[in-house]
Image (cartoon, rainbow, N blue to C red):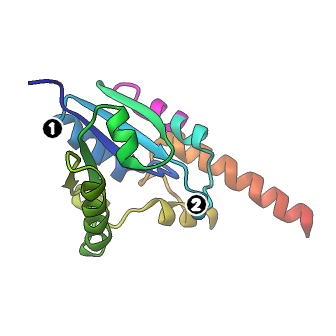
Amino acid sequence: MGVTRAIYPGSFDPLTLGHIDIIHRACHLFDSLIVAVAHNEAKSPLFTTDERISMIEEALQDTPHILVKKLDGLLVDFAMAEDAFVVIRGLRAVSDFEFEFQMALMNRSLQPRLETVFLTPKEEYTFLSSRIVKEVGRLGGDVTPFVPALVTQRLEEKFSKERSRSLASE
């Protein structure tokens, strides 16, 4: 039997402790994991794709068997090019399930060999999302319990620049 490689796709804007929890759980299940950083302009990302890749690589530098790559185009095409046949998706709540289930079925209809494995995070991360972290940070709240220290620093730098621009335009 060959190496089992999985893909954990997402925008990771920014990387949270919930994401890291799912990554560590997946690493116990698979020989190799690709963290695929998606570029999605519809989400109006705070960080560029390269910035997100850099943060993930830095945060996970001591985690073996992980590759961080940019995801452009269809996930199924990326998966086949990477010789990976498992997609990891995190489910925080029942509300995530419907969308994730539809995506899993679509991916399987496009590539029957591609399976989706749903993982749940630790209970303390079930409420956590990148969107909520950005909002808390933007409003000056403490995000340190939710993201790695390097992400806290990068968020503070981004929001400091935003506040400076906002004050300059007033």
- Drawn side of residue 137 relative to residue 21, left or right: right
| Pick the front one: 29 or 165 | 29
Q: Residue 96's x, y, as percent? A: 30, 70
Q: Position of residue 57 (x, y in %)?
A: 46, 31
Q: Amino acid at mark 2?
A: Gly
Task: Name the residue beneath numbered marker 1.
Answer: 29
Q: Secondary structure at mark 1?
A: helix
Label 1 crowd (10 A; few <14 / some 14-19 / many >=20): few
Residue segment shown in magenta: 54-62
**Magenta-colored segment: predominant secondary structure:** helix
Report x, y in % for residue 135.
56, 67
* Earlier sequence position, callout 1 versus callout 2: 1
| Residue position marked by numbered label 2 in the rendering | 137
Left or right: 67, with 151 as reference point: left
For label 2, the SS is: helix
The structure residue drawn at horizontal position 24% and vertical position 55%, both measured from the top left corner, is 108
The x, y position of residue 60, in whole percent, is 39, 32
Q: Residues within 10 Å of mark 2 (few under 14, many from 20)?
A: some
Q: Amino acid at mark 1?
A: Leu
